Image (cartoon, grey):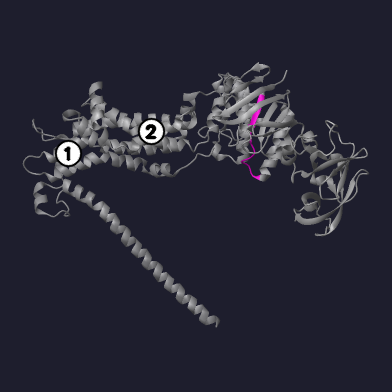
Amino acid sequence: MKTLRIEELSKNFGTTEVLRKINLEIDEGNFLVLLGPSGCGKSTLLNIIAGLETINEGNVFIDDYNVSKVEPKDRNIAMVFQSYALYPSMNVRENMIFGLKQAKTSKEKIEEQLEKVSKFLQVNQLLERKPSQLSGGQRQRVAIGRALVREPRIFLFDEPLSNLDAKLRVEMRREIKKLHQQLKTTVVYVTHDQTEAMSLGTNIAIMNHGVIQQNDTPEKIYNKPSNTFVADFIGSPSMNLIKGVLKENSGDLLFTVSGSNLEIPIKDYDFKDKSNLNNKEVFFGIRPEHIFFKKFNETDFEINLRADLSEYIGHEQIMTFDYANQELLAKFPSTNKIDLGKETKLYFDLTQASLFDAQTEERI
Amino acid sequence: MQDSLQSTYKQLEQKSKYTNIFLRWFLYFILILFASYFIFPLYVMIVTSLKTMEEIRQGTLLTWPSAINFDSWAVAWGGRGYGAGDTFLKPYFWNSIKMVVPAVFFSTFIGAMAGYVLTKWRFRGDKWVFLFLLFGCFIPYQAILLPMARTLGVLGISNSVIGLVLVHTVYGIPFTTLFFRNFYVSIPTELVKAARIDGAGFFKIFFKILLPISAPIIVVTVIWQFTQIWNDFLFGSTFSFGEAAPIQVALNNMVLSSTSVKEYNVDMASAIIAGIPTLIVYVLAGKYFIRGLTSGAVKG
C-alpha cells in the first residue's frame, strides 16, 4: 500500500497546461520534495494533493483510497504555507486548535494534543500571543504546530522557509529534518531551493513545464541526472555540458569536439543502450567539483586547458577554462594558485561523468 | 584663518536660524488663515442660531449673541405647537435614522460578502462581474431615477422609508464592494486555504477569519455610506414626500416654505441639526478612517 499515489494526473488553467500526466508514488514515512523552477507546476500539484484545486484528468489516492473528489478537510492531510497563514485575529492556542474544533474533537483530546505539540515545538510559552507578536521563526513553528495537532497521514509543505532570512532558514531546515526523523510521517514538500531539497528529501521529484523530469533519491539525482534539464538544475555551478561527438576507434569509444584535437576516452560507462554509438552527437557532462588540480584516482583523465577567468568566493574558487571554444567550469580550494591565460593540467574524474543525447537531451 | 572661518560659520548659523523662525511664523499664519476660512461658516451658523430675530436684524453676521438662546433650536426640532403648516425636523430626523441604519448595514454587509467572493472564491467571469459593479460607481444617479421609481412602484414601496433603504442599499453596493475587494485582495489567500484544510466552510471562513480583521475597512465603508445616505437629497426628494421624507428633504421644505418672515436663526439651527450625525460619526471613527484608507495587508 502506498501512502500517496498519483495516476495520470493532468491539470489546465484555461488553455494553459499546468500538469501533464503526472505519476507519483510515496511510501509510508518518506519525505518527497517537489523541486523545480517557478511556474513548473509544483505548487499546483501540492494544492491538488490537498484538494484545494480540482483535477482535469487522473486520480489521487491516499492509502489506496481515491480522494480525487474528497474535500480537503476529509483527506487526513495538513498543510504548512509559505506565508504561514496563521489566523491574525486568533492567538496561538486558537490557531492551533481551530482545525480540531471544526472536527468536533472532544475538549480533553484537544487539550491533550495542544499540550503535547506545543511542548514538542517549544511554543507552550507563546499560547496566548497573537501571530503579529511572534518572530518569523516562531510563526513558522506555530504553523507547523497547527498541522501537527491534527495528526495527519501526510504533511504538505508549500515553500515553508522562503520567507525566512538565510540564517533562520538553515536552522528551520534542520528542525524540519529532525521533526521528520522523530515522527516518521509522510511528507510532500515543495521548494525551488536545491539545497533544501537535497538535505531534506528521501526522494526528489524534479519538475519542469508540468512534467516530472526525474523522481529519485538525492544521490541518484546528483550523480546520474536523467536529462540535461536535471543536470543543469542541480548543482552550483551546474554541470558542464560540452557538445561533441562519440567516435569509435578500434573498439575504444572517444568523445571529441569537431575542430579540436581534444579527446576523452569513454570507458566503463554504464550505457543504457550500447548500439549506434559511433558518430552520435552528445553532451559530455561533468560537474565542476569532479575536476581536480591533482591526480586523486588512478583512472583520473589528464588534460591541458587554458584558464580564462577566476571567481573567488572564500572557501573555494570557480575557474572558467576554455574547452574547444566552450566554457568549462571547475571548483578548486581557494588556496590553489592558477595563472590566467596559461595552459593548466587538470584531471577529470570520469567515473562521475554523464552522457546525454544531443537531440533528445536524455541520458544515454 | 581658522577664526575667520569660525565666524563665517557663526554668521551662516545665525542667518539660517532667522530664516527658520520666519518660515515657521509664515507657516502658522497660512494655516490659521485657512483654518479660519473653513471654520467661519460654522461660526456664523452657530452664532446666528443662538440669536433672536431682533438681534439678527440689528447686528452683523459676526457679532456674538447677547444671550445664549436655544429657542430657535427648540422650534427647529419640535415646531411651535400649532397645527397645519408647521414643519419641524423631529419626525424626519427619525425617518432618516430608520433609513440610514439598515441601508448602511445591508450595503456594508453585502459589499463585504461580494468582496470576499470576488477575491477568495474566484469563479469564471468574476472579473466581468467586478467590472460591471464598478460601472455602478460611475452611473449618474439622475439617469436611474425613472426606472427606479417604476421599480419601487411595482414593489409597492414607493414613498416609504423601506423604499429608500432599498435604493440606497442597491446604489451603495458598487462602492462597498470596491472597498472590500481592494482590502481582501491584499490578504493572503493562503489564509482561506489553511481554513479550508482545517475544515471551515464558506461562511465560517468569512465570519471567523476575515471579518475579525476587517475593522479598518468596515469603518471606512460605514463612514462613507453613512455620509452619502444621510446627506442624500436627490433620492429622498424623488422617491418620498410628506411624512416619509428624510431629514434633508424636510430641511429644504422648512427653509424654502417660510411664508412670511425668513427666520434665519431657526434655519441655521435646523441645518446644524441635520448635519450633526455625520459630524458625530466622523469624530468617533475619523481616526480609523484615515488608518483604514492607508492600511494595506494584514501581515499574518
Question: What residue do we see at 36% from left, 36% from top?
Answer: B135
Q: Is residue A179 left or right of residue A110?
A: right
User: Which of the two residues, A138 or B291, is positioned nearer the viewer here?
Assistant: B291
In which image quadrant can residue A219 be found?
top right
Residue A117: x percent and y percent? Answer: 65, 28
Residue A335 forms part of the magenta stretch: no
Question: What residue do we see at 55% from left, 30% from top?
Answer: A15
Between the C-alphas of marks 1 and 2, the distance is 35 Å
| Residue that mark 2 sits on | B132
Residue B231: x percent and y percent? Answer: 26, 38
Q: Is residue A51 left or right of residue B61?
A: right
Q: Is residue A157 left or right of residue B183?
A: right
Residue B26: x percent and y percent? Answer: 34, 64
| Residue that mark 1 sits on | B252
| Mark 1 vs mark 2: in front | 2
How would you rate the neighbour count of disc 2 (Cα within 10 Å): few for under 14, some for 14-19, many for 20 or more?
few
Residue B47: x percent and y percent? Answer: 18, 49
Region rendered in magenta: A154-165
